[in-house]
Amino acid sequence: MEQSKSVLILGGSGQAGAGTAELLRRWHPALPLTIAGRDIGRAQQVADKLGAATAVTIDLRRSDLGLAADHSYSAVVAALWDDHLHGLRYAQHHGLPYLSISSGLTDIAPEVIVGAQQSGAAPILLASHFCAGTAVLATLHLAREFDRIDTVRIGASLDELDAGGPAGLADLERLSTATSAGLIRRDGVFTWIADPDAEAEVPSTDGTVLPGRSIPILDVPSLALATGAPNVRFDFAVGESAGRRRGEPASIETLIHLEGAGPAGAPLRTTHHLVHPAGQRPLTAVAIALGTERLLGLRGEPVPPGIHTPESLLDPAYAVERMVEVGTTFVDAPGGS
């Protein structure tokens, strides 16, 4: 793909968008970036820090996003909730790869339909997973030890002070009102569950247990279908993080528990915590940057048109390398293996 054109990052001045831009600049210093937001002042501040980047205002109510007709881009990254889907329509109209992170399991249907109706236009990467897919990719990396996976259980805990800015809080509210049911895979069947079955406990690295619940999230079908595990569950909790309990900044933790059989057929189970001391922003940003890099053809083979997910495009081992580079650690849970 021609890299003289700029990557258009919708919401580029927000936490996820700005973090993504910083990583793309670090990995690909010559890659042109356009920071798009409603506030040109904030967008310009991010662009100035990056260097070789421009700032533009966008209007998500307009099909052309309010962008100049003579501007052209290499990809569209929606690091925000685009309720009119004008970012996606703009990408499809111009034949550009598109990545989104805010639709969630309950809101991806329009994106899937657009991808089906215009299947030959350009690739669409649906990354509305937890932290844009890092939990899925880390789990698949850890699953390499197994010959067979029977159970995948994820427990993610988000500090209440790390819910993001206004857009992030609005996303959490919107997704939580869509349904109170959780989605699991039980004995090979995708099943909706309600209280009390949806209630759960999410343990932290320091032994503290937060009350949580099963949520409807793309991680469940992604992990179930990628591993073949008949039992998959993703629980989510919000509360004071281990980092803050130590008097440090808000951290984020994701417990990854796997059960199955090893290469010799013997029973095997492992439990790890994926931890970042700076919270969700670095993990989300690294996943979006990895997806953007892949869609642009900067790593790997060209991506064909159609619908894609993080695990269908990204190498888990490479993703984990990038996660570690930005400060992620993997902590073995006591008695987990």
Image (spheres, grey):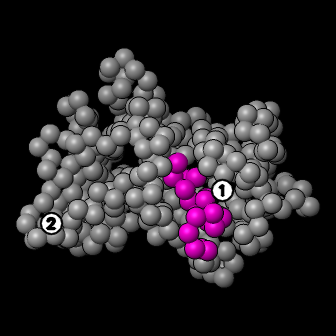
The segment highlighted magenta reads: 286-303
Q: Are marks 1 and 2 in contact (CB under 8 Å)?
A: no
Residue on which disc 2 sits: 262
Q: Position of residue 302 (x, y in %)?
A: 61, 74
Residue 175 visible in rendering: no
Q: Position of residue 337 (x, y in %)?
A: 13, 50
Q: Position of residue 201 (x, y in %)?
A: 22, 41
Q: Kindly report the distance in space between the C-alpha atoms of the residues bearing marks 1 and 2.
A: 39 Å
N-terminal label among 1 and 2: 1
The quarter in which the N terminus is drawn is: bottom right
Residue on which disc 1 sits: 77
Amino acid type, residue under disc 1 in the picture: Val
**What residue sits 22% from the left and 42% below the top?**
332
Q: Is residue 18 left or right of residue 109?
A: right
Q: Which mark is residue 39?
A: none
Residue 69 within the segment the image draws in magenta = no
Amino acid type, residue under disc 2 in the picture: Gly
Toward the right, the furthest residue is 70
**What residue sits 67% from the left and 74% below the top?**
122
> Camera-side residue: 201 or 306?
306
Residue 290 within the segment the image draws in magenta = yes
